Image: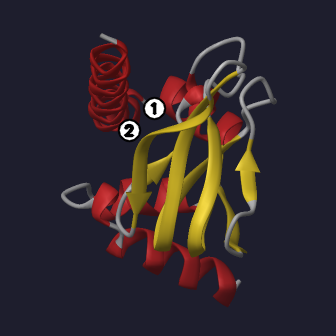
Amino acid sequence: MSEDLDITAELGRHSFMKGVSEEVVTRIGACADGVASWGEDEMIFRSGGEATKCYLIQSGEVAIEVYSPGTGSRIVQTVSRGEVLGWSWLFEPYVWSFDARVLTPATAIVLDGEAIRHCMNDEPNLGYPMMVRFARLIVGRLQATRLQLLDLYASRN
């Protein structure tokens, strides 16, 4: 039980949760699977794999990468302390769109994606503010991908 309180307290201090009510933090905290840690160069997930988790980065740096058979892996964005890794668990078919590789040893609060979806669906007062937060994340990821594509095609000309 005290471990849950610690995770909820950590969740409440994470910048992604800044400005949400204590009630929402507690409810999202109930969806936590714990805290995970990874060493340098470890893969957290791979594109095409089942997307079931959301990671709130507490320390370290993680590269979000896209792989192309012709050019290999390319970093689209790097996430670090206070940022969120993973949103593919929000939308069917619940499959990762990118790879996530650890650049420097990292830790994260791990949230169960299915549990969060159920909370968001069942509790509109929780669902809407959380979806707005995740939408900002998605827009940022799309903008980073767009910049990488512009850079890739500009370097070919």
Q: Is residue 58 above or below residue 17?
A: below
Find the residue positioned furthest to the front.
157
What residue is shown at x 29% (from left), y 10% (from top)? 157
Specify whether 47 is left or right of 24.
right
Name the one closer to the observer, 35 or 9: 35
Residue highlighted by disc 1: 123
What residue is shown at x 69% (from left), y 70% (from top)? 34
Q: Which mark is residue 126?
A: 2
What residue is shown at x 32% (from left), y 58% (from top)? 17
Q: Is residue 86 visible?
A: no
Specify whether 149 is left or right of 40.
left
What residue is shown at x 57% (from left), y 54% (from top)? 55
Q: Position of residue 45 (x, y in %)?
A: 73, 44
Q: Helix, strand, or loop for circle 2?
A: helix
Q: Helix, strand, or loop for circle 1?
A: loop
Q: Is residue 51 above or below residue 64?
A: above
Q: Which mark is residue 47?
A: none
Q: Is residue 84 visible?
A: yes
Q: Are marks 2 and 1 in contact (CB under 8 Å)?
A: yes
Q: Residues within 10 Å of mark 2 (few under 14, many from 20)?
A: many
Say how many tags the image has: 2
Q: Residues within 10 Å of mark 1 (few under 14, many from 20)?
A: few
Name the one closer to the observer, 59 or 153: 153
* Residue type at the position of mark 1: Glu
Find the residue positioned furthest to the left.
19
Q: Position of residue 51 (x, y in %)?
A: 72, 32
Which image quadrant is residue 9 in? bottom left
